[in-house]
Amino acid sequence: MREGTHMREGDHMSEATGTPRTIAGRMDATGLKVAIVASRFNEFIVDRLIGGAMDYLRRHGMDPGAATVIRVPGAFEMPLVCQRVAASKKYDGIVALGAVIRGETPHFDYVSAEAAKGLAHVMLATGVPLGFGLLTCDSLEQAIERAGAKAGNKGVDAAAAMLETLRVLEQV
Ligand code: INI
């Protein structure tokens, strides 16, 4: 607990040690069923995000056969399909993967904003943990950097975030 903060009734503290009870996600994907909802738009980039997410989940215990990859046309369609997937109750979690790359027109802003808002809404409305792996980049180069090159792989990050959130939700 930070200095200057005070305990209130209902706060969880271990009486024996005076240290806070901590809830943290166990990073174990054993036995999970995961849907990866991925856009076909900018497929070259998105395929690398799928590879990163699958590799992460497999290394953390998931049977690769327990994952389903669902392709959608573009980022704009991702919220609807994720909503249907979440409502089906067939999956423990969803990893949403796509790439929106800025062009000459404001199209980028509409697609990326609606996709991000829609995906957040799906997670809150359904309670199914969703890893947000939608790249929003100014250039193809930036997208490549985030799809397995020098800035890491956003598919890995999205899978890890979904797994951690799922394991936290089991405990709260
Ligand atoms: N969809 C993307 O996933 N990424 C993009 O960069 C993109 N751009 O730039 O246009 C994009 N557009 C398609 C959009 O998501 C819809 O599929 C389309 O408008 C049909 O509804």
Image (tube, rainbow, N blue to C red):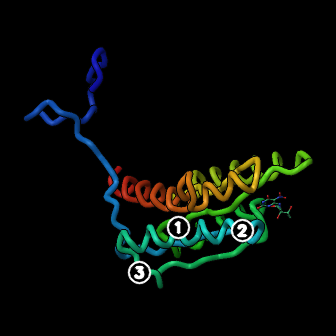
Q: CA distance from mark 2 to mark 1?
A: 15 Å
| Disc 1: residue Cβ within 8 A of ligand 1's nearest atom | no
Quarter of the figure with residue 38: bottom right
Q: Which mark is residue 39?
A: 2
Q: Secondary structure at mark 2?
A: strand
Q: Which mark is residue 63?
A: 3
Query: Residue flagged by tag 3: what amino acid is it?
Result: Asp
Task: Name the residue at the bottom extreme.
Answer: 65
Q: Residue 138, percent across and down?
A: 76, 47
Quadrant into which the N terminus falls: top left
| Disc 2: residue Cβ within 8 A of ligand 1's nearest atom | yes
Q: Residue at x 33, y 65 (%)?
A: 28
Q: Judge from the rendering whether residue 93 lies leftward or rightward of residue 146; answer left or right.
A: left
Q: CA distance from mark 1 to mark 3?
A: 15 Å
Q: Residue 33, percent across and down?
A: 46, 75
> 67 or 20, which is in the foreground?
67
Q: Judge from the rendering whether residue 123 lies leftward or rightward of residue 161; answer left or right.
A: right
Q: Residue at x 61, y 69 (%)?
A: 48
Query: Residue flagged by tag 2: what amino acid is it?
Result: Ser
Q: Which mark is residue 109?
A: none
Q: Secondary structure at mark 3?
A: loop
Q: Residue 74, percent across and down?
A: 77, 65
Q: Secondary structure at mark 1?
A: helix
State whether residue 172 is above or below residue 71: above
**Is label 2 or label 1 in front?**
1
- Residue marked by disc 1: 52
Query: Residue flagged by tag 1: what amino acid is it?
Result: Gly
What is the crowding at mark 1: few (fewer than 14 residues within 10 Å), some, or many (at least 20)?
many
For the residues bearing labels 2 and 1, Cβ distance under 8 angstroms: no
